[in-house]
């Protein structure tokens, strides 16, 4: 089981979880649901990553993180976000 850093952001009534180590995202109606979907996506990605030679992973850049946090800045709830640690 690996340790990942996740940023959670509320967007249009849904929560989006972004993994900073690999850029994978999960979305759900609650923070817990978004993290659950993110864990599932990470597990699926890791299976493919181990079996394919042309797949790579890289951490999220500062520019990508800024875009994730501030895109749709005009939405009333778009500035709600949280940093969390998860194991997947």
Image (cartoon, rainbow, N blue to C red):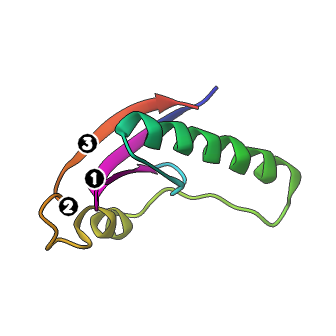
Residue 74 placement (x, y as % from top left): 14, 74
Cα separation, mark 3 vs mark 1, equals: 9 Å
Q: Which mark is residue 10?
A: 1
Callout 3 secondary element? strand
Residue at horizontal 16 percent and vertical 57 percent from the top: 77
| Marked residue nearer the N-terminal end (1 or 2) | 1
Q: Quadrant of residue 72?
A: bottom left
Label 3 crowd (10 A; few <14 / some 14-19 / many >=20): few
Residue at horizontal 70 percent and vertical 50 percent from the top: 45
Queried whether the magenta region covers residue 16, the answer comes back as: yes
How many numbered marks are there?
Answer: 3
Q: Quadrant of the C terminus?
A: top right
Q: Is any part of residue 54 visible from this angle?
A: yes
**Proximity of marks 1 and 2: CB atoms separated by less than 8 Å:** yes
Residue at horizontal 39 percent and vertical 45 percent from the top: 29
Q: Which mark is residue 88?
A: none
What span is in magenta?
A: 5-19
Residue named by callout 2 = 78
Cα separation, mark 2 vs mark 3, equals: 12 Å
Residue named by callout 3 = 82
Queried whether the magenta region covers residue 35, the answer comes back as: no
Using the image, determine if residue 50 lies above or below residue 1: below
Who is closer to the viewer here, 30 or 54? 30
Label 2 crowd (10 A; few <14 / some 14-19 / many >=20): some
- Left or right: residue 40 compared with residue 51: left
């Amino acid at each position: 089981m690996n340790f990942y850093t996740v940023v959670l952001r509320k967007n249009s009534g849904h929560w989006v979880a972004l993994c900073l180590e690999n850029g994978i995202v999960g979305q759900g109606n609650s923070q817990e649901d978004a993290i659950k979907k993110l864990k599932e996506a990470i597990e699926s990605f890791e299976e493919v990553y181990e079996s394919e030679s042309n797949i790579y992973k890289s951490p999220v850049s500062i520019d990508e993180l800024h875009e994730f946090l501030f895109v749709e800045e005009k939405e009333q709830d778009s500035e709600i976000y949280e940093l969390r640690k998860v194991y997947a």
